[in-house]
Image (cartoon, helix red, strand yellow):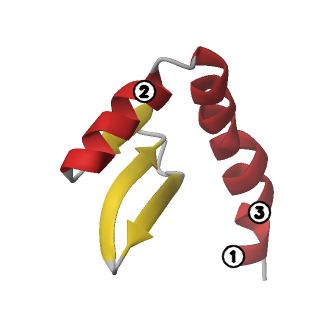
C-alpha cells in the first residue's frame, strides 16, 4: 500500500495530466489536461493497464531500490 505509480505529462515545464495509482485515474491540471483526462478515463482497458503498472513495474523493481543487504 505504500507504493505508488505516477505517470506525469508535461508541456513547457507545466504538468498538465497525471495518472496516480492511488487515485486510480488520470487527473488534469490545466484546461487541456482536464479535457484529456476525461477522454482517457473513459477507456477502461487503458485505466486497467495503468493500474496494473503498480504491480508489474513498481512491485517488480522494489528489490532493486530496497534490496536485502
Q: Which residue is mark 3?
A: 61
Q: Quadrant of the C terminus?
A: bottom right
Disc 1 crowd rating (10 Å Cα; few below 14, some 14-19, many 20+) is few
Residues at circles 3 and 2 in contact by the CB criterion of under 8 Å: no
Provide residue 45's location: percent of width, then percent of height.
67, 20
Kindly identify which numbered label has been placed on residue 35: none
Q: Quadrant of residue 27?
A: top left
Vertical placement of residue 11 versus 51, above or below: below
Compared across the picture, whether 16 is left or right of 4 comes to: left
Q: Is residue 30 above or below residue 63?
A: above
Hey, which quadrant is residue 36 in on the image? top left
Q: Is residue 48 above or below residue 19?
A: above
Q: For residue 65, which numbered disc appears in the image? A: 1
Q: Position of residue 51 (x, y in %)?
A: 60, 33
Q: Which of the marked residues, 3 or 2, is nearer the chain's N terminus?
A: 2
Is 27 on the left or on the right of 65, as rendered?
A: left
Q: Residue at x 68, y 43 (%)?
A: 53
Say if residue 12 shows up in the picture.
yes
Q: In whole angstroms, how far apart are the C-alphas of marks 3 and 2?
A: 30 Å
User: Where is 31 relative to 44, above or below?
Assistant: below
Residue 67 at least partly seen: no
Q: Which residue is mark 2?
A: 39
Rendered residue at 34%/79% (across/down): 12
The quarter holding residue 52 reads: top right
Q: CA distance from mark 2 to mark 1?
A: 34 Å
Whether the residues at callouts 1 and 3 have beta carbons within 8 Å, the answer is: yes
Amino acid at each position: 500500500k505504500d507504493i505508488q505509480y505516477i505517470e506525469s505529462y508535461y508541456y513547457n515545464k507545466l504538468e498538465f495530466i497525471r495518472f496516480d495509482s492511488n487515485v486510480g485515474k488520470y487527473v488534469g491540471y490545466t484546461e487541456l489536461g482536464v479535457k484529456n483526462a476525461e477522454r482517457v478515463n473513459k477507456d477502461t482497458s487503458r485505466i486497467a493497464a495503468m493500474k496494473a503498472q503498480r504491480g508489474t513495474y513498481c512491485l517488480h523493481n522494489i528489490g532493486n531500490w530496497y534490496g536485502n543487504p
